[in-house]
Amino acid sequence: MAESHILKRHPANPILVAEQFPRPVNSVFNAAATKFGDQYLLLNRVEDLTGSSCLWLARSDDGIHFTPDPEPAMIPAEEEPFRTVERFSLEDARITQIGDIFYITYVAYSKYGCVTSLARTQDFQTYERVAVMTLPDNKDVVLFPELIGGRYAKLDRPMTRQPSSGDIWISFSEDLVYWGDPRPVMKPQPRKWDEFKIGGGAPPIRTPDGWLEIYHGVRTTASGFLYRLGAALLDLEEPWRIVGRAAEAILSPSAPEDFKGNVGNVVFTCGAILEADGEIKVYYGAADQVMCLATCRVEDLIALCLQGV
């Protein structure tokens, strides 16, 4: 039976599983994605058998078959100010290339809750921590790949309303360290698939029609939370302004791997790659257990966002 969603699952799913790593781990999911030279890279959240997560790189020549590096890329820091906020875990990275530098935003967990921190690399061999970007609790931070009005820009999801609901906001920085000028961008849609909370997924992708943001949305059900993926277009010059937003989810849990894992009913993306031929590769974690891939044409996703505008 043909899939009803615009994103189509790859027949090789899941493309990365815990058994492929060089030492025993519990799960691999929610990976950042980028291209580096001729290779595809996934910077995966890998949970070990103690329940703590690190960031572990896997490499591929075709974007489908990945091989993990021998050791993790980043583990909780020993130096301050990062040590205090990273004591428990590193999670859910995103990668944005600006010039020849690849910036990595990642969630850090400690007894103080979750913050988002920033690191950078030029070779995916060594990593330099830059700053703790947010106060707790704030996550789902994605950097824009270009300066907006001469400033760096990020989307995030401050957890200001309880219990644990959240909107997407934008803020700006001159130096990637100190952030301000915050503005709301998107809210959950009442009585829709993303009615409870939303958060940035892949870093924004520039298109002629606007910044394409693939995000996640959550709905509460009788059996718990249901995580899906959606898409929106933001104005190129004023990205706090929505140009179009897809009314329907672009991917929902429906495959066996979306339900059989640590947290069922979940598809969650931290990275997407726009190919030169217009194909978008969306890498997503399924059930907080394995990594998967789904694809579509960028023009089809844009058209879905602009329906009814």
Image: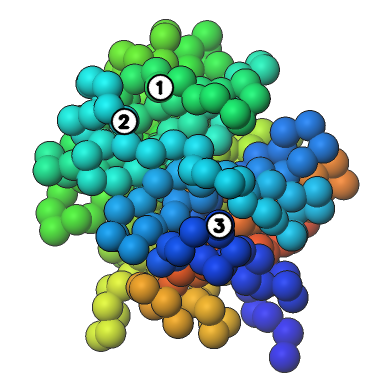
Q: How far is the residue under mark 3 from the one under mark 1?
A: 25 Å
Q: Is residue 164 left or right of residue 216?
A: left
Horizontal and vertical percent position of residue 9: 68, 71
- Is 279 on the left-hand or right-hand side of 153? right
Quadrant position of the N terminus in the picture: bottom right
The earlier-in-sequence mark between 3 and 2 is 3
Q: Which residue is mark 2?
A: 77
Quarter of the image where one finds residue 186: top left
Q: With respect to residue 217, does 116 lie above or below?
A: above
- Asked if the residue under mark 2 is in contact with the one under mark 3, i.e. CB atoms within 8 Å, the reply is no
Reading the image, the residue beneath label 3 is 22
Q: Secondary structure at mark 1?
A: strand
* Residue 129 - label: 1
Label 3 element class: loop
Q: Position of residue 72 (x, y in %)?
A: 49, 43
How far apart, in angstroms, are the residues tagged by discs 3 and 2?
22 Å
